[in-house]
Amino acid sequence: MPLTAIALIALVGAIELLNARPPICPCGTIKLWNGVVQSPENSQQIADWYSFSHIIHGFLFYGAAWLALRRRPTLRAWALPLAVLVEGGWELLENSPLIIDRYREATMALGYSGDSVLNSLCDIGWMTFGFWVASRLPPWWTVALAIGFELMTLVIIRDNLTLNVLMLVAPIEAIRTWQSG
């Protein structure tokens, strides 16, 4: 099923291009890493602090697939394509005006304009990497890594997957103020 996953990734990229998402950072450069959250290059490059959240998505999707499919070996081959489908769907939704506007009003992402296509596709790649890692590590190691990533990004950038979801769904002014520094 790897070809199905690759086809889904290509489809997400094509849809984003059709939706006029910038293929690469509007700055015109491609970088492996952007470590400055409050910059126009955030969510535009191959990796940034939010890549850790996408790796955790992979951990979570692998765990869900393991729980749902452990007694159905014939369906296990579809676990990764399903994870790519869900992550790709999130990338499309995340880069829609609805979510971009929500991020701007409810989170610390004041100037957020969405991801470049490069960043979106790499986010799916980071999720796939997380899925692969979780498939090879004992569950407790995967949980420890997820907690470590959450704590690291909380300390370094005052944001993480947990806060991102919380602030998107039910923003708390005190957290927004703390995140603003």
Image: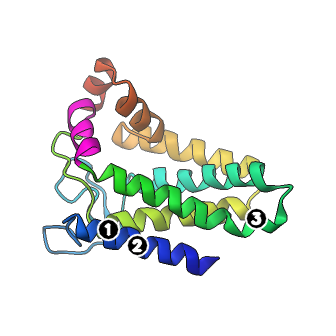
Residue 165, percent from left and from top: 43, 36
Q: Earlier in the sequence, mark 3 or mark 1?
A: 1
**Residue 174 x %, y %:** 31, 18
| Residue in view at x 21 percent, y 32 percent | 105
The residues colored magenta run 97-108
Q: Is residue 57 left or right of residue 15?
A: right
* Element class at badge 3: helix
| Up/down of 149 relative to 15, above or below | above
Between 83 and 53, the one nearer to me in the picture: 83
The amino acid beneath tag 3 is Leu
Q: Secondary structure at mark 1?
A: helix
Three-letter amino acid code at disc 1?
Ile
Is the C-beta separation of discs 1 and 2 under 8 Å?
yes
Which residue has dot 1 on it?
A: 15
The residue furthest right is 71
Q: Amino acid at mark 2?
A: Leu
Q: Is residue 15 left or right of residue 123?
A: left
Q: Position of residue 123 (x, y in %)?
A: 42, 62
Asked if one can make out residue 145 in the rendered structure from this viewpoint, the answer is yes
Residue visible at 74% across and 59% down in the picture: 137
Could you say whether the residue bearing mark 2 is in a helix, strand or loop? Answer: helix
Mark drawn on residue 160:
none
In the rendered structure, find residue 11 and report the number of the disc placed on it: 2
Q: Is residue 98 magenta?
A: yes
Residue 24 in the image, given as x and y percentages of width and height: 23, 71
Mark 3: few, some, or many residues within 10 Å (few <14, many ≥20)?
few
Q: Nearer the N terminus, badge 2 or badge 3?
A: 2
Marks 3/1: CA distance? 27 Å
Q: Mark number for residue 75?
A: 3
Residue 145 among magenta residues: no
